[in-house]
Amino acid sequence: MEMPAPNSMVLSAKPQIVARLRTVLPPDAVIEDAAETRAYECDALTAYRCPPLAVVLPRTTAEVSDVLRICHEAGVPVVPRGSGTSLAGGALPTADCVILGVARMNAVLETDYDNRFIRVQSGRTNLSVTGAVEQDGFFYAPDPSSQLACAIAGNIAMNSGGAHCLKYGVTTNNLLGVTLVQMDGTVLEIGGAHMDSGGLDLLGVICGSEGQLGVVTEATLRILPKPEGARPVLVGFDSNEVAGECVSDIIKAGVLPVAIEFMDRPCIEATEAFAKAGYPDCEALLIIEVEGSPAEIDEQLALIKAIALRHNPVEFREAADEDQAKRIWLGRKSAFGAMGQINDYMCLDGTIPVSSLPYVLRRIGEMSKAIGLDVANVFHAGDGNMHPLILFDANKPGDLERCEALGADILRLCVEVGGCLTGEHGVGIEKRDLMGVQFAPDDLEAQLWVKDVFDPRWLLNPAKVFPLAVTASRRAA
Ligand SMILES: Cc1cc2nc3c(=O)[nH]c(=O)nc-3n(C[C@H](O)[C@H](O)[C@H](O)COP(=O)(O)OP(=O)(O)OC[C@H]3O[C@@H](n4cnc5c(N)ncnc54)[C@H](O)[C@@H]3O)c2cc1C
């Protein structure tokens, strides 16, 4: 993975830069010791690492503004960081950067049930947003599998999704407003505690902008009343393609489950060994969950069952109670951890039209055989968001490179069938060099203009998202 050479002037000015940062932050909020900055050398894409120049952990928007103003004046790149769970290397440091971590900014600022919103500091973890309102019967819908750890800041930057986003939409559909600090320290309020706002849709530009345009310090989020009930079913199939066809038919029939999750045999076996959820011995399984009143649940499940039976499932298991529902979800929720126990893996993230699922699954199988690396599939099938996990051995010379090559081919395939390079994990450094597969040079240039407006000196997260060659002149200037 190519990264730009660090700016030697910034490296040699480290003592002065740290001293200036200490004038605006408490002593424990500036980390410069090499042993401690190492904790920030990577995110969840652990294949790539680089300790930063320094780390700052502000607690307020005013402190963030001061830090950014100082870095702007000194020409120091800044990499915003939430909880560091990015699988795309979005929070990977450069040696000359200051990591601006928002983990200490985790307060609930306002809760308004009448108008159904909550305002939080952006370092608050996803799950603890629901934790703050669930006693009153509300929840925050986007639910990345990393929700125990990941921060709202990272969710907004990556426009994160999750298992239940088939029904409720991803972060952008549940975000009402943000406080954003620009690289020169200017504080902007975008959107608010209401649907839509006048003027251009700047909130839509910020959500998914991967820390390129500003640092999000506060967020206003839509909260929803908890549904009356929910019930999952587990359906096992004897081939990936047939499971894919079943997903496609459910979506075509117009039923809207809250989630349709897919796991293939390698994933089923790994999670069974790890979580012992009692999954059937089959090639592929779907977990389909519906919500509503008991009558609504029965009606939706009857339709889903009728569609599933047309595909001759090897098993159709409906949760009879809360305990069985938890067991159905247990394996899916442990899938990433379970795979990590048996192998190094790279988790891809592309989207495809749902109707292409059977074809794409077959092609991934063929490509995996051809290159000699196993691929396990676990993903949000209902919205065509694929997460092939490529298994490799990080200690075996050449394996990482083969894994990267296969990953690139799979993502090219997603674009080829009319999909997209990323569904929810973002571009980061992982897919940076593939952006040309999806966008023509003019399209890319138009995206660079947006960054020029928000961050004219190209100091925010500068080596991410766009191929280095197309940003070289801007970064050098
Ligand atoms: C086991 C596992 C499961 C996962 N499952 C899912 C899933 O189901 N769905 C999903 O969408 N993702 C998933 N992810 C990926 C990851 O959790 C998400 O991308 C998440 O939103 C990242 O949040 P974070 O706080 O950790 O951000 P970080 O990793 O710290 O940063 C991510 C990006 O956000 C930027 N950023 C961080 N803070 C700010 C800020 N304050 N202002 C502006 N930009 C900022 C960073 O610069 C970086 O580009 C998973 C990851 C793991 C490890």
Image: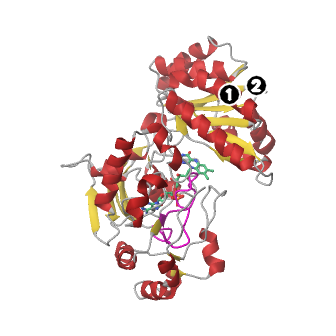
Judge from the rendering whether residue 170 lies leftward or rightward of residue 260; answer left or right. left
Residue that label 2 marks: 282
Judge from the rendering whether residue 467 lies leftward or rightward of residue 264; answer left or right. left
How are the residues colored? Answer: secondary structure
> Circles 1 and 2: CB distance less than 8 Å?
yes
Rendering coords of residue 285 (x, y %): 68, 27
First to last magenta residue range: 80-106
Judge from the rendering whether residue 360 lies leftward or rightward of residue 273; answer left or right. left
- Residue at (67, 56) in percent of width and height: 47
- Residue at (51, 81) in percent of width and height: 30
- Residue at (56, 55) in percent of width and height: 86
Quadrant showing the N terminus: bottom right
| Amino acid residing under circle 2 | Cys
Quadrant showing the C terminus: bottom left
In this rendering, is residue 14 above or below 441? Answer: below
Q: CA distance from mark 1 to mark 2?
A: 7 Å
Rendering coords of residue 231 (x, y %): 57, 31
The mark found on residue 285 in the picture is 1
| Amino acid residing under circle 1 | Leu
Q: Residue furthest top?
A: 310
| Quarter location, residue 63 | bottom left
